[in-house]
Amino acid sequence: MPPAQEEGCPTAHRIFVTLVGGGAFQRASICHAGQSELMHIEPINGVGELSLRDLTSVDVLLAWNEHDIIEELKSQLAIVARWCPIVAISEGASVPQVVRAMKAGAIDFLTKPVRREALFAAINAAIERARANGARELSLRGLNDGHASLTPRERQVLALVAQGWPNRAIAAELGVAVRTVKAHRAQVMHKMHLSCVADLVHAATRLGLIRRA
């Protein structure tokens, strides 16, 4: 299945992949396997060349699993404040090598000969992971923005409600009327776009206001 081709959408956007490391023949074989109208693979010699390139359009990094290349790639991405899914490739790998690569940050591991179907499947999975990661970042950014819009008193109410305090206990703790607590709570729900207490607890957990059990 071609990468990123959605049902009913034959003109899905083209995927840009950067292939890092390996020898010239190895890179050529991967580029040949991934040849598609919907995907462009750009091979480069090593991690050092990434600093000379614009990574904003790169959807996936393919990396030959040599030495500590996954760690190097992550360090380079951190420098430019960019997250990008990494798929490791090797001529052959033991279980410990695969485990080390995955722990280092690779989200998939392919071994040569890399079949076209396996390559496309790995890239599709990487893109879906990137979309999910972006959605989580966007969601957390929205929560942070909503939390920043709260008044100090509303933040106190948010924290106490998330910890399971009833309105009367919060009112006694803050020295205000119960109706005032209810008003603050309503403002918290409105400003943070929350619909129920469960959403409030989840938001507070993601913001680090309460610890997970």
Image (cartoon, rainbow, N blue to C red):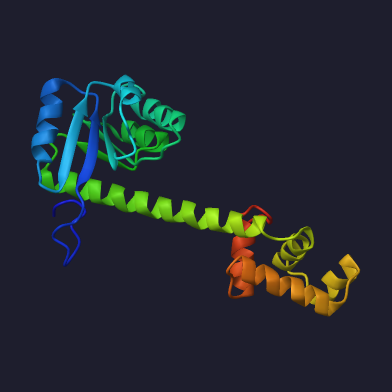
Q: Is 201 in front, or is 181?
A: 181
Q: Position of residue 73 (x, y in %)?
A: 37, 29
Residue 213 visible to an observer of this rendering: no
Residue at 14% in and 48% down? 38
Residue at 54% in and 53% down? 141
Q: Position of residue 66 (x, y in %)?
A: 29, 23
Residue 52 visible to an observer of this rendering: yes
Up-down relation of residue 149 to residue 67 (above or below): below
Residue at 43% in and 28% down? 75
Q: Position of residue 193 (x, y in %)?
A: 58, 69
Q: Is 193 in front, or is 166?
A: 193
Q: Residue furthest bottom?
A: 179
Q: Is 52 in front, or is 42?
A: 52
Quadrant housing residue 181:
bottom right
Q: Could you tell me how many numbered marks the image carries?
A: 0
Q: In which quadrant is the N terminus drawn?
A: bottom left
Quadrant housing residue 25:
top left
Q: In which quadrant is the C terminus drawn?
A: bottom right
Q: Would you say 121 lies left or right of 67 here?
A: left
Up-down relation of residue 167 to residue 24 (above or below): below
Residue at 86% in and 72% down? 171
